[in-house]
Amino acid sequence: MRYAERSKGIRLTMAALLGAWVAGQGPAAAQPTFQTVPLPRLPVGVDQSVFDRPVARFNPNLPAELVIRNRTGLPLEYGFTDPRQKVSELPAGETLRLSNLLIPNCMAINTPMLAPVGYQVSVDPLNVITVEVRLVNDVSGDHCLDLQETGAIFVN
């Protein structure tokens, strides 16, 4: 057999194998090199269901007001993740009151220096959602107040 004929035969064989591999058929079909593993469970003694519970609830059928109290000693940056996407500043020790909230929505509240903060959330009978923001000794801290259309409030 001449070199040109052997070379043509090898190219045809390679093209057939490559075609079968791309189509996922035949012996050349690629096998996944990874496997799906379940997410790890929380350590023993930590209640997994706590992470599925809201920190507070408001009445989604009534107008709600959001009050942010800056107890960090530092200025805060805050902004909704809705289409406005405007970031504003709340000076240290000041209180902010917002009404006419778009629900569902998420409000990011952080220090410009990214010092970790924690949110303490409460809702009063008049549907006023109050968030006390304080510095915490936790590297992750809180980042977002998630107001859901069901009335559930989560902290992320």
Image (spheres, grey):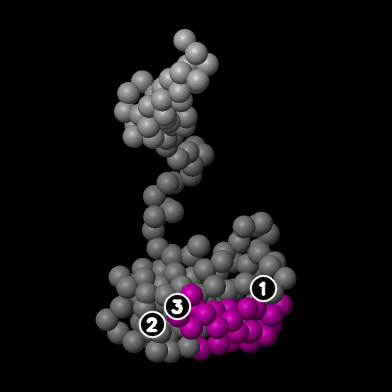
Is residue 131 found left or right of 72 in the rendered image? Answer: left
Q: Residue at x 34, y 32 (%)?
A: 24
- Residue where numbered disc 2 is placed: 102
Give the amino acid at mark 3.
Asp
Q: Position of residue 23 (x, y in %)?
A: 34, 34
Q: CA distance from mark 2 to mark 3?
A: 8 Å
Does the segment drawn in magenta span residue 94? yes
Q: Is residue 45 visible?
A: no
Q: Position of residue 88 (x, y in %)?
A: 60, 84
Q: Residue at x 36, y 20 (%)?
A: 27
Q: Position of residue 1 (x, y in %)?
A: 47, 10
Q: CA distance from mark 1 to mark 3?
A: 20 Å
Q: State if disc 3 and disc 2 touch (CB < 8 Å).
A: yes
- Residue where numbered disc 1 is placed: 111
105 or 98, nearer to the observer: 105
Which mark's residue is nearer the viewer, 2 or 3? 3
Give the amino acid at mark 2.
Leu
